[in-house]
Image (cartoon, rainbow, N blue to C red):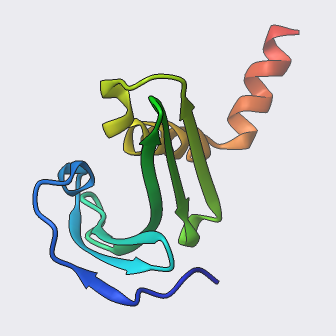
Amino acid sequence: MYLLPKFRLEEEGQYYQRWSGYSSSFYGYGWRVHNFVDTQTNEPTTIVHHGGSVNNYRSEIAIFPEEDLGICVLFNSQNSLARTCIPDLHKIIQGIMKTPVEKDLKESLVLL
């Protein structure tokens, strides 16, 4: 179970609003609870997210409750990667998870 959204956020121009499929955000005990629509399946999905910086250190943390997945990225400086690292890494992980295990095992055995 994840944090329930408490207050709808009416922010404009936030970097996460440019993530593919974004529809709305809520505040939930220090976390942002984002609603998205999967651009390939049109299915709604939720991301629990927190990102920010202190003293030039930057962090991005996202939990994908429907996928039982969490991503945490820590930077030791301000940089442009922070704005898109969560959706970029999520896309990579989705590609890995969709790869059939049997195919990987067969390819590994052929290499032996």
Say above or below: 110 vs 45: above
Residue 21 appears in which quarter of the rendering?
bottom left
**Which residue is the extreme one toward the right?**
112
> Residue 72: x and y, percent?
59, 45
**Which residue is the extreme one toward the front?**
55
Q: Nearer the viewer, residue 18 or 51?
A: 51
Q: Nearer the viewer, residue 71 or 91?
A: 71
> Residue 85: x and y, percent?
41, 36
> Residue 27: x and y, percent?
37, 78
Residue displayed at 55% across by 72% down = 66
Residue displayed at 38% across by 34% down = 82
Q: Nearer the viewer, residue 74 or 36?
A: 74
Residue 110 appears in which quarter of the rendering?
top right
Q: Is residue 28 left or right of residue 108?
A: left
Q: Is residue 63 left or right of residue 104?
A: left
Count the labels in the image: 0
Residue displayed at 80% across by 20% down = 108
Say above or below: 24 vs 93: below
Say above or below: 40 vs 35: above
**Which residue is the extreme one toward the top?**
111
Q: Quadrant of the C terminus?
A: top right
Q: Quadrant of the N terminus?
A: bottom right
> Residue 24: x and y, percent?
23, 74
Q: Nearer the viewer, residue 42 or 72?
A: 72
Residue displayed at 23% across by 63% down = 22
Say above or below: 21 vs 30: above
